[in-house]
Image (cartoon, grey):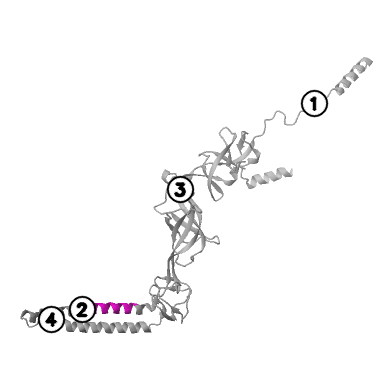
Amino acid sequence: MKPVSLLLLSAAALSAGCQPTTAAAPGAGKPAQVAAVAVHTVAPRSLAITTELPGRTAAYQVAEVRPQVGGLIQQRLFAEGGDVQAGAQLYQIDPATYKAAYNSAKAALAKAKANLMAATPKVARYKDLVAIEGVSRQDYDDAVAAAEQAKADVEAAAAALDTARINLDYTRVAAPISGRISRSNVTPGALVTAGQAGALTTVQQLDPIYVDVTQSSTDMLRLKRELESGSLKKEGGQAKVTLLLADGSKYAQEGKLQFADASVDPGTGNVVLRALFPNPKHDLLPGMFVRAVVSSGVDEQAILVPQQGVTRNAKGEATAMILNKEGKVEQRVLATGSTVGDQWLVKSGLAAGDRVIIDGLQKVRPGAPAQVAAAPAPSTPGTAAAATKRAAQ
C-alpha cells in the first residue's frame, strides 16, 4: 500500500473516534401513562329507610297495690317476683271488726224490714176507716208517714249492709291486674291504713310491653316533609320497629309504632315515640336500655356509594371523585345521609350512571385523565403451567 493511502485511512479513523456519541433517552416519544382506577357505577334502587334511636322499656300497665281499709296484715299470699292473675288474693287484713260491723248492719236491716211489715198493713186498715170516719184523717196521715219512714229505714239499712260487706271484702287485698308482682313492702303483723301513701306491692303487665324512644324534632320534620313530597313512601299504615338489645343481639319479636308525643322537650329538642312489642317470654323488663330501629318509609330512588369512595375536604364536606364520559376526573360535593352497611346513602350530588372512583384515588386528581382498570383474566390450569414453564426458561 502506498504511503499516501495509509495516511488518508489513519486520518479518517482519527476523525471518526473524535465525534461525540448521542444516546436516545429512554421512553422518548412515548405518550404519558393514564392512571387505571376501579369505579362504582351509580344505580338507584328501592331501599327501606330506617332510623336507629335510643330508648327504654316500660310496662304496659302498672298497678300499685294499696289497702282500702285499715288493720293488721295477717297473711301474704303470693310469691315475690311471680305472676299473678287479676282478682287473686295478695294479702289478708284482720277482718274481725269488719265482720262484726257487717253482722250489725245485717241485724239493723232485719229490724227495719220488721218495722215496715208492721207499718204497711196499718195504712191499708186506716184507709178503710177514714172513709167511714172510724179514725181521724190525722191518724191516717200519721200511719202513711210511719210506713214511708219504715221503707226509708229499710233502704238505709240495706245501704249500710252493702258498705259493711264492701269493707269486709276489702280485707282481702286482691291483684287489680294480671302481671308480674314485685317484692312485698310489708310483712304479716304490719299495721296498714286505708289509702296510705306507701304501696304494699306493685303489679306490672309485661306482655305486651312499651318501648319509649326519643327522636330529634329536626329529624321528625325532615321525615314528614319527605313523606309528604313523595320521596319517601310509607309501608302500610303503621311504622314497624325492631329492637337491638344492650348486648347487641336482635330481639326476636317485631313491634309497631303507636304514637308520637304531642310536645317537644324544650331542654333537648326531642320528641318521645312509643312502640308496642309482644313480650310472651318476658325477655324485656321495664327500664332496660335498647336501641329501636324504626322503619321510616321506602326510598324508591336511593343512591348508595361504597364508603371508600367518599372523602372529606378541608371544609368537612363529603366529596367523591367521578370519572366522566370524557375520561377525565372531576370532584363532586355530596350530601350524605345515614350509612347502610359499608355504604353511604347519598341525598344529592350524584345521578344514575355516574362512575364513582373507589380504588386508585391516590393516583388521580381533578382534571387528570383516567381509565377503568381491566379485570384480570381468570387463570386456567393450562395457562398457569405455561406461565410457569416460561418463567423457568
Q: Amino acid at mark 4?
A: Asp
Q: Of marks 3 and 4, which one's residue comes earlier in the chain? A: 4
Mark in front: 2 vs 1: 2
Query: Identity of the amino acid at label 3?
Result: Leu
- Residue bearing the label numbered 3: 221
Q: In the image, which is nearer the foreground, mark 1 or mark 4? A: 4
Residue 22, labelled with which disc? 1
Residue 149 to residue 289: above or below? below
- Judging by the rendered image, the residue that carries numbered circle 2 is 149
Q: Nearer the viewer, mark 1 or mark 3?
A: 3
- Tag 1, which secondary structure? loop
User: Which residue does the numbered mark 4 point to in the structure image?
Assistant: 139
Alpha carbons under labels 1 and 4: distance apart: 158 Å
Query: In the rendered structure, which segment of residues is drawn in magenta?
Result: 152-166
Q: Position of residue 345 (x, y in %)?
A: 52, 46
Taking the spot 33% from the left edge, 82% from the top edge, the residue there is 101
How far across and down, in percent of the image, does residue 243 sit? 49, 59
Dot 3 falls on a residue whose secondary structure is helix
How far is disc 3 from disc 4 in space, using C-alphas?
83 Å
Q: Are marks 2 and 4 in contact (CB under 8 Å)?
A: no
User: Marks 1 and 3, Cα distance to the nearest angstrom?
Assistant: 75 Å
Q: Amino acid at mark 2?
A: Gln
Q: Which quarter of the image is occupied by the N terminus?
A: top right
